[in-house]
Image (tube, grey):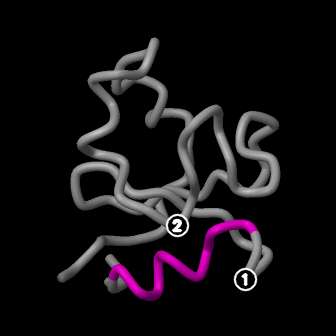
Amino acid sequence: MTEFTRNQLALRNGNDREEIWIAYRGVIYDVTHSKLWRNGKHYEHWAGQDLTDELPDAPHDTKVFEKLQVIGKLVK
């Protein structure tokens, strides 16, 4: 699996590059084509970040990630 740093993830925020990525539990997902992530924003969440700590506040569970394409692994 391809590895990406937090800085590389941050560039995929919907503004700096065309790709829109998010991370959860060390896995990076592509949300570029999701209608819920237009312009890199999903409610009060921003793309290009690790959202692991934010999921407990979400109205959905981890099954939402099963529908997303895995891009790679988040490394420190």
Question: Label 1 is placed on what type of residue?
Answer: Asp
Crowding near pointer 1: few (<14 within 10 Å), some, many (20+)?
A: few
Left or right for 30, reference 61: right
Q: Position of residue 10 (x, y in %)?
A: 50, 77
Q: Mark 1 and 2 residues: CB-CB less than 8 Å, in contact?
A: yes
**Residue at point 55% right, 34% down?**
67
Residue 54 sits in which quadrant? Answer: top left
Q: Position of residue 41 (x, y in %)?
A: 68, 48
**Residue at point 47% right, 76% down?**
9
Image vertical order of residue 50 relative to residue 59, above or below: below
Q: Which residues are magenta?
A: 6-14
Residue 5 sits in which quadrant? Answer: bottom left
User: Which mark is drawn over residue 48?
Assistant: 2
Q: Nearer the viewer, residue 13 or 63?
A: 13
Please, which residue is most extreme toward the top here? 59
Estimate the spatial distance between the alpha carbons at disc 1 and disc 2, rounded to whole Å.
10 Å
Q: Nearer the viewer, residue 49 or 74?
A: 49
Q: Position of residue 49 (x, y in %)?
A: 43, 62
Q: Which residue is mark 1?
A: 16
User: Which mark is drawn over residue 25?
Assistant: none
Question: Label 2 is placed on what type of residue?
Answer: Gly
Q: Position of residue 37 (x, y in %)?
A: 71, 44
**Residue at point 61% right, 74% down?**
12
Please, which residue is most extreme toward the front here? 44
Left or right for 69, reference 63: right
Left or right for 68, reference 14: left
**Residue at point 55% right, 53% down?**
69
Crowding near pointer 2: few (<14 within 10 Å), some, many (20+)?
A: many
Please, which residue is most extreme toward the left here? 76
Mark sitting earlier along the chain (1/2): 1
Q: Verify whether residue 21 appears in magenta.
A: no
Q: Secondary structure at mark 2?
A: loop
